[in-house]
Each structure stands twice: as C-alpha cells, then as structure tokens.
Image (cartoon, rainbow, N blue to C red):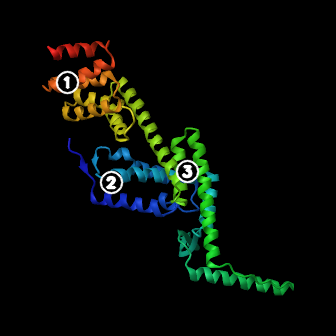
Amino acid sequence: MERKPLNELETKEILRIQAVAREGTHYDTLGVDLVGTKEDVEGAYHSYVRQWHPDRFFNRESGELHTVIDENFAAVTRSFRVLRDLAQRAAYDAELRAFNRAPVPTAVPPVREGGQETPGFEVTFRKQDKATQAQRTADALKAADALAAATGNPRTKSKAPSAVDKIRKQLHAQLGQARRYFDSGKADFDAGSWVKAEGNLYLATRYDPQNIEYQALHKEAATRGRHARAAHLVVQAEQAEGYGQAKEAQTYYRRAVELDPPDGKAFFRLAQILRTQEDDMRSAVELYRKAVVKDPRNVEYHVVLAEVYEGLSLKENARKLAIIASAIDREHAGAKALLKRLKA
C-alpha cells in the first residue's frame, strides 16, 4: 500500500519544532509560560503527543524527516520531564537566570473584566540587550549611592570585572552544570535507566559540547535506550500475536525493526507475517536476510530462509544455507531434512 507523504504545513511545523527544541528553552519547546502550572505543562505535552507522536507517522512517507520526528518527540519529552518536576524545574529556572535567559515581563493591552480594566502582562524569553543591562547596572549603582549617603556609609567603589573575567566565570558555571548533568546521567546509566540517562547526558553535551567523554556515554545510553525500546515493542507484538491481532503485531514489529535492535527476532517475526499474511515475499526475504545476519548462529532463521529460497527456485542459495544450518546443529531435524532434499 502506497504511503501518503507529509504535506507542506506538516513539514514546516516539524522543522519549526526542531529549531525551537535546539535553540530554545524547555518552556519554548513545550510552548508554556514560566508561570504555567503543572497542569499547563501536562496539557501541552499531551496535546503534542496526540498530534506529533512518531506512531502517527508510521504509515506516512516522511523521508529524512522520520528521524527529525523522533528527535522532536525526545526533546519535547525531556522538556516535559524537567518542567513537571518541581525540583528539576526550580533548578532549571535558576540556570535560565544564571545565563541571563530569565523571562522578562512586558506590558500588553489591559484586560477588561466586568467593565473594569486590569493590567495584563505576558512572559517572553529573550536575552537582555547590552543597553538594558547597562541601564539596570547604572540604576543599581545610583540606588546604592543614595542609600550610602542617607546612612552615612559611603559605598566603596570596587574595580569592575573585566570582560575576560565575566566570560571565564560564565564558562566555569557552564562547565560545572555540564558535569552535574553528566554525573546524574552516569548514575542513571549505571542503574540501567537508559532513557533517563540519555536525557541528562544530552544536557551535559549541550553545556559542554567539546567533551568527548560526555558524547561517548550519551551515544551509548542512546543506543541502549533504543535497544530497550525495541525489546519492549517485541514483547507488545508477541502479546498482540497471542490475541490474534496480526495488524497490531505487524505495527509493533515494524517499529522495533526501525530501531535496529541487535538481535534478529523482530526482523524474523515481521518477515513471517509479511510472507504468510501479506504475500509480500520481497520484503519478507530482505527481513529474513537481516535476521540471519543479526543472529548467525540461529538455525531456525537459516532453515526458514533456505525454504523460502527453495520455493523461489533459488536452489543453490537454499543449499548453502542448509549446509550452514547443519553445521551449526547437526541434529536439527529441519536442517537435515532440508539438506537431504536439496541434495537429491
């Protein structure tokens, strides 16, 4: 069945979400205000999941955007996990303030309630420009001078930190935060919490992108997390097969295969379904081959693929596989019968 391609609006929105997730804050990514409640955070996340969960695009032709859709979902999920947890959210807000990315209230038209005007405001996330920072610093110094004069305690002027000092201090804080995220991610990794580890290690690589150690462990956590998700999908597929739900099982196996698990089970089971129920022999053969490559010691995979080759009149290919299967397990009845039949 031909898969429907993404339309222009969907493509633009997927790319927009990607840009926001890469450059914006967790609040930007979820589309909620700093003052948003936990319910607002959960509502925004669930709304995103309903519209942009990767499962919704399983039967769509998305090309290279398939990876972007997965990455967007992972980024939104990370933002959701941080903002729904009060402790993590408080720590993250402190980071925004430390890096001068705290929300700045700006005036908006008043809101009328029952005939009365009440002042309104909105929260925007932007870095303060240099003029604004300089003006605020000057105002603070004037206030300090006025207080000193009133109390008879003149303010001692101190040497302003140089630009280099400021950069060094900011870099030190950034690297320190990267280390804290790495330590948390490493603890999660050692505990086998791959998905959680991936999130913290991802943040570590964002704060210290040149650190090879952070990158390597993040990559390993991402790989193990992907394999864990694939294994879970295979379990779901097997349960669906147990209830006779072939279509659901096929969907789960496809999703598992797309995660490229280290073993051949998902490839083999999907091939069986496509061969016996969808009559898609071409796709089935490709999947059988991958299953054999993934599990080169699995006799069943070799025997089934050999039988398929035999049915396609590819006798020499079938014979080679039968010989390999017999070498793996000389007592395997299916391999012995197949080899005997092909030598006849």
What residue is shown with label 1?
Answer: 318
The answer to whether residue 79 is visible is no
Under circle 1, the secondary element is helix
Q: Are marks 2 and 1 in contact (CB under 8 Å)?
A: no
Q: Badge 3: few (under 14), some or many (20 or more) residues near its Cα, within 10 Å?
A: many
Crowding near pointer 2: few (<14 within 10 Å), some, many (20+)? some
Residue plotted at (74% across, 83% down): 143
Q: Nearer the viewer, residue 186 or 137?
A: 186
Residue 145: percent from the left, percent from the top?
Answer: 77, 85
Vertical comparison of 61 with 312: above or below: below
Q: Secondary structure at mark 2?
A: helix
Observer-side mark, 2 or 1, equals 1
Q: Determine the CA span between mark 3 and mark 1.
A: 49 Å
Residue beneath disc 2: 65
Which quarter of the image is occupied by the C terminus? top left
Identify whether 92 is placed above or below 315: below
User: Viewer-nearest of labels 3 and 1?
Assistant: 1
Q: Earlier in the sequence, mark 2 or mark 1?
A: 2
Q: Amino acid at mark 2?
A: Leu
What residue lies at 37% left-to-right and 54% top-to-bottom?
Answer: 68
* Nearest to viewer (mark 3 / mark 2): 3
Closer to the N terminus: mark 3 or mark 1?
A: 3
Q: Amino acid at mark 3?
A: Asn
The reply to whether discs 3 and 1 touch (Cβ–Cβ < 8 Å) is: no
**What kind of element bears circle 3?**
helix
Q: Residue at x 19, y 34 (%)?
A: 282
What residue is disc 3 on? 200
